[in-house]
Every structure is written in C-alpha cells, then in structure tokens.
Amino acid sequence: MEGRSRTEARATVAFCGTRGLPANYGGFETAVDEISKRFVEGGYECVVFCRESSGGDALKYHEGRKLAYVRGSSRRSLDTFISAFQTGWQLLRHRKTYDHVFWFNNANFPGILLTLLARIPVSVNTDGMEWRRAKWKWPFKAYYVLASLLISLLCTSVISDSKAMQGFYRKTFKKKTHFIPYGIPRTPEVPPDRAPTILDRYGVEAGRYFLQITRFEPDNLPLEIIGAFEEAALGAEGFGFLLIGYQRPTPYAQRIKAMDGKGGIVVADAVYDAEVLQVLRENCFCYVHGNSVGGTNPALLEAMANCPRVLAIEGRFSREVLGDEGYFFEPDGVASSLRGVLKSPDQSADMRSRASSRYDWDSVAEAYMRVAEGRPAGYLTAVWQERTGRRGT
C-alpha cells in the first residue's frame, strides 16, 4: 500500500460526518473503518468523530484510531445537523491539530463550513442525491440542494463515489470531482454447522428464498418489492422472501411489518452480525436491490461478492456497478421481473470477478491518501484503467 513510512512525521487526519466506530450502522461507517485503518497502517494519525447519540460504549481508541465524541441530538431529524456543527466547532477550536479533514455527506454542511473557516484542508464525499428521498420534506430537500451547491462552490476537493455521480456534479454544479468508490467487503469464515442454524432461525431454505437487506425507507422500495413478491405468488411455488432491516416503528416500517407471514414473506429486524449476513447472502436464490438515489452502493457490492444472482432497480448507478452480470427491474414491473429471474443462470463467479477487480479497499484508501496529500485521487485498478483508457481522477 502507498503511504508514508512510520519514520516520517505523522500527519493527523480526521474523519467526520458519520456515526463513528465501531462500524455498526451503514455504508459510510464501514467506509471510514476500512479507509482509516489503512491510513494508520500507512503511518498517519487518525481521529474518527463519533456521535454519543448513537449509543454504545464511548471507547477512546478503536484498532489504532483515536475516537472523538460529539453529543448530537436525541431528535433524529436534527441529529446530523447538530452533530455536524459540534464536530466543526471542535475542529475550529483545535485547528492546528489536523492536517486534513474528510467529511462524509453534504448534509453536514454546518461542520464543513466551520472546517473551511478554520482553514484546515478539507475534502467532502458528497454521498447520493438525498433530496430525492421520499422521506424528506421540502425544507430538507431544499437545504440539501443548497448545501450541495455551496460545497461545489466553496470546496476545492470533492469526492464522488461513482462515475455517474461524478458526471452529475459536473453537469449540474459545474464541479470537477475526484472519483473514489467503495471496496467489496471481506468475507468472514463461517463454521459449516452454523449455516443451517441461521437459516432455521429465519425460516428459510437454502436456494429457495429472495433476499433484501436495507433500511426501511421508501426510496429503497422494500414495501413495493415484497408487495410484488406477494403479487407474483412465488410463495405458492415454495419460495420465500426474507426482508432484513426493521428498526423503528415508523408508519412506513409498520406497513412493511404487517406483511410478515403473508405468502412466504419474512420481515426481520436489522442485523449487523457479519457471519449471519454472510450465510443469508450466499444461500439465497436472488438478492433484490431497490436503492434508487445513491452512487456506488455498499450493499450492492456485498451482494455481488456473495449472492448467486442480483436483481437491481434499473438506473445508471446500478448499471455502472453490475454491468452485464446483473438483472434489472423497473419499479412498475417488479412482479414480472421476480418471476423472470427464476429462469436466469447463477452469475456469482462473474459478479465476484467484476466486484473484486473494480472495487478494492486498498486502492480506495490509497486514493484517499493522495487526496489528503493534495494530489489527484487517481483511483484505478487494472480493469478501470483498461476500460477507461486513462487514469482515474
């Protein structure tokens, strides 16, 4: 891996805007975990900002990374905004401590602005098009669009996690961004005797169930997808549908929960046990991916690395990641697509090959290191370089 030797002066890099470590929430937390641990291996001092509002033990260090905490807010709607301000205020007060700051998600604009005021070199990973999420009301949608515009105007270093997102920022905000995606996850070794126990726990049979692991939010289409599964009457043919992700009794989540037990549908709580998730992915018949507003989605990469088939929502983000190795559905034709994939061959080998050759955490971390040092990200694997005919930017 690239990076300075440990005998050189150690630059201090902060990772901000996520719930922090240990990574027990989502893709951004996993990304910070994978990237920052490689920064430490490369000789950097790393500080990861965490939210006390996320609960858990307040550790001082996690596998070589120093953890700093902000209080956040007990109100979920305000947590990101307040946490961002509190993080930015800490950065401003201790501005001489940090050589570079990485922020994740444009919704953290108050903290990003304070970092700019502190004159600390900063890079922002924009995330997806949050203003398109159905769960947000128009004030937040307007805030997010404005924040994205201002970040494009004020920040010299902006990161897009997909080529499609990079093109969107170039066209919409006239902003040239670094392209750095995410990597595929490490596959845990699961004891052979654990798989049957896990499948029994969820009431599914190996090779006879569809799977979706997602947050219960409208733009991920969990309600529409299980409704289509019921419409397709696949339960009558011995197939099940396992939907993982229930966390809170929101009105939308309650509508999903009400489908539990209907026509082979199983609605289960969110789970973060890597071995459990590994067993569920590798034993499903097909993984269904409905996330519609992001760039390179970590859940899709995990499915490509572990599932025999992936049926994903049609769109430029899914197409960029899956290429010709996946299957696709239109939102108004989910039931027919679920039926159609029954005749589709196992694509696991081709998907694993594509994912491992394009989405590599070592290459991702090296690109972030180059950005921290004021250089172009230059993200590439051999395949990206061969297919694009040039180095990444």
Image (cartoon, helix red, strand yellow):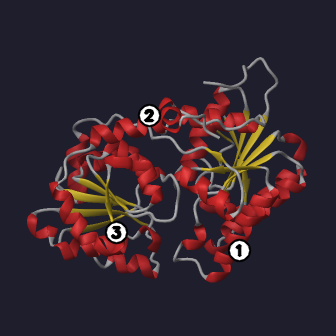
Residue 330 bears which disc, if any?
Answer: 3
User: CA separation, marks 2 and 1?
Assistant: 37 Å
Q: Secondary structure at mark 2?
A: helix
Q: Position of residue 17 (x, y in %)?
A: 68, 56
Residue closest to the eye, 262 or 230: 230
Q: Position of residue 156 (x, y in %)?
A: 79, 50
Q: Position of residue 243 (x, y in %)?
A: 32, 64
Q: Residue at x 43, y 79 (%)?
A: 252
- Left/right placement of residue 264 relative to residue 321 reads left
User: CA separation, marks 3 and 1?
Assistant: 29 Å
Q: Position of residue 306 (x, y in %)?
A: 33, 43
Judged from this view, the residue extending furthest toward the left is 237
Q: Where does label 1 land, which residue?
A: 143
Tag 3: amino acid: Glu
Mark sitting earlier along the chain (3/1): 1
In the picture, residue 110 is in which quadrant?
Answer: bottom right
Judged from this view, the residue extending furthest toward the top is 7
Q: Residue at x 71, y 37 (%)?
A: 376
Vertical position of residue 343 compared to residue 269: above or below: above
Dot in front, 3 or 1: 3
Tag 1: amino acid: Tyr
Residue closest to the eye, 208 or 71: 208
Residue closest to the eye, 316 or 7: 316
